[in-house]
Amino acid sequence: MCVCLRPAYRDHVWTYDFVFSRTHDGRPLRMLTMRGEYTRECLAIDVSRRLTSEDVVERLSDLFVTGGTPKYIRSGNGPEFTAGRVRNRLGRVDVRTLFIKPGSPWENGFIGCFNAKLRDELLNVELFVTLLEAQVLTERWRRHDNQVRSDSSLHYRPPAPEAVLSAMNFTPGPS
């Protein structure tokens, strides 16, 4: 069961989930979306035909090296998130898991709302011909979402600059 833990600071709680789509020829696309709950920054969207627990471990490892580790990570109960290799990797860096109750997607609302926005603004609008096209357009959308789009919960600033300011513990100097 998921503890309804609200994020209190940067890297307190991350969340991840999968989104499904298709290319023009009907072949499947699977997207692993990862987001920091406090900063609202989309940390990654991996797009592939198939994503496994090993892919989850690789993405987590990359993010841990480049951006630090969260205290908690919230997810559903899919086999890619509950797999021993994922839990072992998280345990080695002291990241605790928050699994939502099965059939209760509202317990992971941060990523659910984000994935709905991804679907509305990109997946329902673009017709991907190739996997590479889906990867490029998705990364472009992710960067725009982080660097340009304002978020009301961040006082109408974009998430990525908020994450940078938070990391620097920015305090304006005298003018």
Image (cartoon, grey):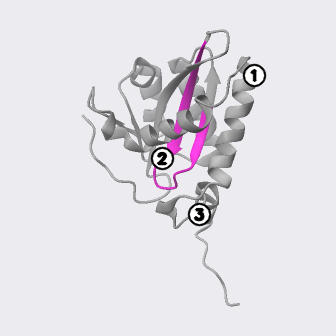
Q: CA distance from mark 3 to mark 1?
A: 30 Å
Which marked residue is nearer to the observer: mark 1 or mark 2?
1
- At 74% across and 31% down in the image, what residue appears? 136
Q: CA distance from mark 1 to mark 2?
A: 30 Å
Q: Are marks 1 and 2 in contact (CB under 8 Å)?
A: no
- At 68% across and 45% down in the image, what residue appears? 143
Quadrant for the N terminus, please.
Answer: top left
* For marks 1 and 2 on the same chain, the one whose residue lies earlier in the sequence: 2
Which marked residue is nearer to the observer: mark 2 or mark 3?
3
Q: Residue furthest bottom?
A: 175
* For marks 3 and 1 on the same chain, the one whose residue lies earlier in the sequence: 1
The mark total stands at: 3
Question: Which numbered circle lies on residue 157?
Answer: 3
Identified by mark 2, the residue type is Pro
Q: Where is mark 1, residue-wise?
A: 132
Observer-nearest of 4 and 58: 4
Identified by mark 1, the residue type is Leu
The reply to whether residue 174 is in sight is: yes
Identified by mark 3, the residue type is Arg
Q: Find numbered disc 2 in the image and state the secondary structure of the residue it sits on.
A: loop
Q: Please, is residue 94 above or below residue 8 in the view?
A: above
The x, y position of residue 127, in whole percent, is: 68, 23
| In-image side of 65 versus 5 (left or right) | right
* Residue extent of the magenta highlight: 28-45
| In-image side of 80 versus 166 (left or right) | left
Q: For the residue carrying disc 3, how many other residues have a C-alpha within 10 Å: few (<14), some (14-19), or many (20+)?
A: some
| In-image side of 29 versus 4 (left or right) | right
